[in-house]
Image (spheres, rainbow, N blue to C red):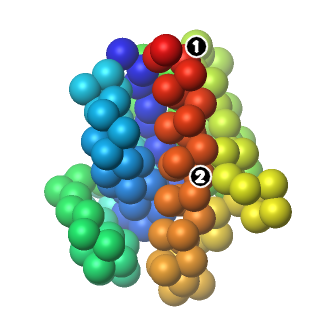
């Protein structure tokens, strides 16, 4: 099993989108049964909530569903997961402030094209859910390539 946790600030926009897109492609690549996939926020404000309507609608228009409910990252996650994939450097700092675990804490866009941005911008403020979808989809495919090598 390879365990992957996607993390953003609120766990209602970026990380639940990344979780759903990554799971969708993991199914297509036939590796979903070898993965444990979840998402969480560094903040607590939206715990228990469904994703933002912008996230739900861009997912739905790409044929992807989610029933994720927001949760806050817990220090135990740092040892449970193999990868903690954060959307931006603030998320990385906030995760690292929780302590040090076995998980590899990586920026999502490290798995994206070299020509692209190195952080996933927050659509809660920008409204650019379509752009975020394109970024997390490209990076999800890169992450799947890395994990397939690990599973091989
Ligand atoms: P996310 O976006 O981190 O991509 O889920 C945000 C959602 C909520 C807030 C900030 C960012 N907020 O301040 O409530």
Residue 138 locus on image (x, y percent): 57, 58
Left or right of 77? Residue 121 is right
Image quarter of residue 34: top left
Question: Label 1, on which residue?
Answer: 102
Residue 19 locus on image (x, y percent): 38, 49
Q: Is mark 1 within 8 Å of ligand 1?
A: no
Q: How many marks?
A: 2
Residue 25 locus on image (x, y percent): 37, 48
Helix, strand or loop at label 2? It is helix
Image quarter of residue 10: bottom left
What crowding class fits label 2: few (fewer than 14 Cα within 10 Å), some (14-19), or many (20 or more)?
A: many
Q: Which image quarter holds the N terminus?
A: top left
Q: Residue furthest right?
A: 115
Cα gap from disc 2 to disc 1, whole angstroms? 22 Å
Helix, strand or loop at label 1? It is loop
Q: Residue at x 59, y 65 (%)?
A: 135
Of the two numbered discs 2 and 1 in the rendering, the one whose residue sits closer to the viewer: 2
Say which of 65 and 104 sits in front. Answer: 65
Q: Which mark is residue 139?
A: 2
Q: Which mark is residue 146?
A: none
Q: Residue at x 38, y 55 (%)?
A: 21
Q: Is residue 152 above or below residue 106?
A: above
Tell me, yes or no, whether the two marked residues, 2 and 1, touch with CB atoms within 8 Å: no
Res 36 seen here = no
Left or right of 129? Residue 26 is left
Work out whether mark 2 precedes mark 1 in sequence or the reverse, and give the earlier one. Answer: 1
Q: Residue at x 29, y 79 (%)?
A: 61
Image quarter of residue 13: bottom left
């Amino acid at each position: 099993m390879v365990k992957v946790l996607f993390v953003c600030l609120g766990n209602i926009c970026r990380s639940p989108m990344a979780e759903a897109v990554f799971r969708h492609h993991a199914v297509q690549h036939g590796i979903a049964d070898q993965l444990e996939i979840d998402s969480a926020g560094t903040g607590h404000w939206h715990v228990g909530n469904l994703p933002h309507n912008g996230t739900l609608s861009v997912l739905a228009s790409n044929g992807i569903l989610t029933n994720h409910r927001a949760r806050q990252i817990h220090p135990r996650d740092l040892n449970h997961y193999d990868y903690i994939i954060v959307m931006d450097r603030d998320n990385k700092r906030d995760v690292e402030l929780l302590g040090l675990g076995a998980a590899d804490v990586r920026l999502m866009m490290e798995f994206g094209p070299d020509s692209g941005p190195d952080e996933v911008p927050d659509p809660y403020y920008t409204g650019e859910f379509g752009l975020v979808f394109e970024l997390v989809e490209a990076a999800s495919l890169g992450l799947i390539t890395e994990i397939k090598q690990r599973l091989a």
